Image (cartoon, rainbow, N blue to C red):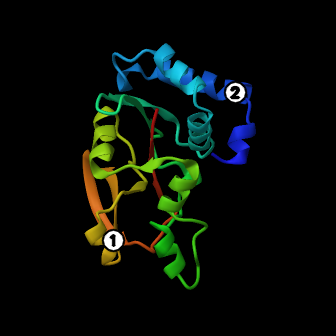
Amino acid sequence: MSKKIKEAALSEFDGLLQALQKRFEKNSYRHKGIAWHDIEARLKKNKKKLWSLNEMDLTEGEPDVIGYDNATDTFLYCDCSVESPKGRRSLCYDPQALESRKEHKPKDSAIGMAREMGIEILDEIQYRMLQELQPVDLKTSSWIATPAAIRKLGGALFCDRRYDHVFVYHNGAESYYAARGFRGLLRI
């Protein structure tokens, strides 16, 4: 845990907790059968997770609970913004892709930024699960976790929703576009 997180008082997250509760209550279709007090109790016990959620919120991901994983006994927070989070666009796929660019490098990579934030990048199954809850990425696209065999050959995967259908595409991992970002998942 970083020094910054260790030194943060729980009271510093009061505004975030209020925003998360309001979003949770407004969008109950995303998490049927889950009670806010259960989420809040876990969040108050874990400043590191609160810090990660704050980073998701600051980059305009609009994180909200989208489910519960029985196998790991964790609630799943995901970026639910309609478009790929504004503060996480124009990124290549991973640190290796960022390093391989000789000029016109983006500010960061999706995988690198996700690690710094303490979140996972969505995989294809998680991305499709989010799309079942609500249509997202109607004008933007989002990098998704890419299988090692594809990445080894220099590629990376991204998704979007067009024509009321979710599409999975490929691109060079070092590419980046103003309308492509990434969505994160945080287990609490």
Q: Is residue 12 left or right of residue 110?
A: right
Q: Measuring 37% from the left and 23% from the top, which residue is drawn there? A: 31
Q: Circle 1: is it few (<14), some (14-19), or many (20+) Cα within 10 Å?
A: some
Q: Do the numbered discs 2 and 1 sit on residues whose CB atoms are within 8 Å?
A: no
Residue visible at 55% across and 26% down?
43
Query: Left or right of 69: which side holds 106?
Result: right
Question: x%, y% of residue 135?
Answer: 34, 39
- The alpha-carbon separation of the residues under discs 2 and 1 comes to 40 Å
For label 2, the crowd category at 10 Å Cα-Cα, with few meaning under 14, some 14 to 19 and many 20 or more, is some
Between tags 2 and 1, which lies in front?
2
Q: Position of residue 2 (x, y in %)?
A: 67, 48
Identify the residue at the far bottom of this view.
102
Give the side of residue 93 with respect to residue 170, left or right.
right
**Residue 121 location in percent, x, y?**
42, 51
Q: Which label number is shown at residue 2? A: none
Residue pointed to by mark 1 = 151
Q: Which mark is residue 10?
A: 2
Question: Does residue 28 appear in this view?
Answer: yes
Identity, as a three-letter code, of the amino acid under mark 1: Arg
Reply above or below: 93 against 12.
below
Residue at 54 percent of width and 20 percent of height = 40
Residue 47 is situated, as x and y percent measured from the top left of the image, at 62, 33
Disc 1 is placed on an element classified as helix
Task: Look at label 2 and name its amino acid.
Answer: Leu
Location of the N terminus by quadrant is top right
Task: Look at 38% across and 31% down and name the residue there.
Answer: 66
The numbered mark, 2 or 1, whose residue comes first in the sequence reads 2
Helix, strand or loop for disc 2: helix
Residue 179 visible to the viewer: no
Closest to the observer, 136 or 148: 148
Q: Quadrant of residue 159?
A: bottom left
